[in-house]
Amino acid sequence: MRLSLIGSPVVAVLVGFGGTLAVIVEAARAVGASPGQITSWVTGLCLAMAGTTAWLTWRHRQPIVTAWSTPGAALIAAMPGIYDPHQAVGAFLFAAALILLSAALKPLAALIERIPPAIAGAMLAGVLLRFVIGAVAGINSDPLFVLVLIGLFLVLRLMAPIAAVPIVVVLGLVWAWLGGRLSGVSGVGLSHVELIAPAFDPAALIGLGVPLFLVTMASQNLPGVAVLRAAGYSPPVRPILAVTGLASLLTAPLGAHTSNLAAITASLCTGPDTHPDPAKRWQVGPFYAAGYLLCAIFGASLVAVFAALPPALMATIAGLALLAPFIGALGVALEQPAHRYAAGVTFAVSAAGVTFLGLGSAFWGLAAGILVLALDRVRAIFVK
């Protein structure tokens, strides 16, 4: 047993959990979740990560690690006050059902893959724009604190890009505690779960469930498969979708949104630094699962800490955590010259934050981009 088989998954858990927990809290607040429901949300996600990773790594003997959908959480957080917890859970169940259908019906998965990456990337970039801007906007209310955190992040990313956000989060929390910015936080608490009855509101299913499904597939599952293939593995895509979709379905009533393949953190567990023999890297699975199981048990304390932070500081942490996904999505959106105009329309509509017919801007951004792309193709036919 190599120590790297323990160290790599532990670092991956710390990066995945600590680096994006603020985004989950923001998403839960956006749908009006209570403190208990926020804790249940995080607990459900951590249990899903532990269970799916343990099964997939053991069953397929590959380092198939899973994560929660950070872009999906950002999508939810970008719709404050539009849906309540019951409508959100209904949308989560619908997104999970679509993931399961993608596993069962190969044509559906192929149809999702046909959505131009530029359109999917532009939609995600538009959703994330508010958070990236919010990271800087906190300067107005607490300039010293926010500027120091941003400066520290910019320096740390030069030396340890993957660990930069978790380190900033830890130092920011310590500084906030020493400076009296944390209030109402007491002791170490054990997590718990709460069942939330779903409400299958058509507007929520289409306006939240469909974009959540598309973002999860395009921004998490497809890159996660690419990471595994780049490491020399042949991941069983449909079984992975079936397992993560089932986990999403089971944990949705706890308030948890979708589970999926890890992308960025997966690179910490799939390379030669984990183990020189690719056939033995799957052994990171039990340690990764154990890490998320601990987060499921004690995550309530961290949720309480993040929930006690002033909104401006939460916005800074969430914005820094989403900066890399924003840059990546924007790069994908602008990569193909033929799709840039449609991507620009998608980005603008998604970032506008408009709500029409009960549907959020992410849905309308996707629809507008596909419409523009279709018109461009019709024009190309007549020009020929």
Image (spheres, rainbow, N blue to C red):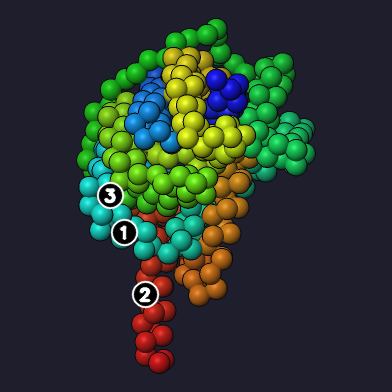
As drawn, 31 above or below 6: below
The quadrant of the rendering that contains the N terminus is: top right
Q: Which residue is mark 2?
A: 374
Answer with left or right where residue 48 lies relative to residue 87. right
Q: Quadrant of residue 245?
A: top left
Say whether disc 3 or disc 2 marks the residue closer to the N-terminus.
Answer: 3
As drawn, 368 above or below 129: below
Q: How many marks?
A: 3
As drawn, 73 above or below 226: above
Q: Which residue is mark 1?
A: 110
3 and 2 marks in contact (CB < 8 Å)? no
Residue type, numbered disc 3: Ser
The quadrant of the rendering that contains the C terminus is: bottom left
Q: Label 3: state its secondary structure.
A: helix
Q: Is residue 58 visible?
A: yes
Q: In x, y percent, where is residue 280? A: 49, 31
Say whether disc 2 or disc 1 marks the residue closer to the N-terminus.
Answer: 1
Label 1: how many Cα within 10 Å (few below 14, some 14–19, many 20+): few
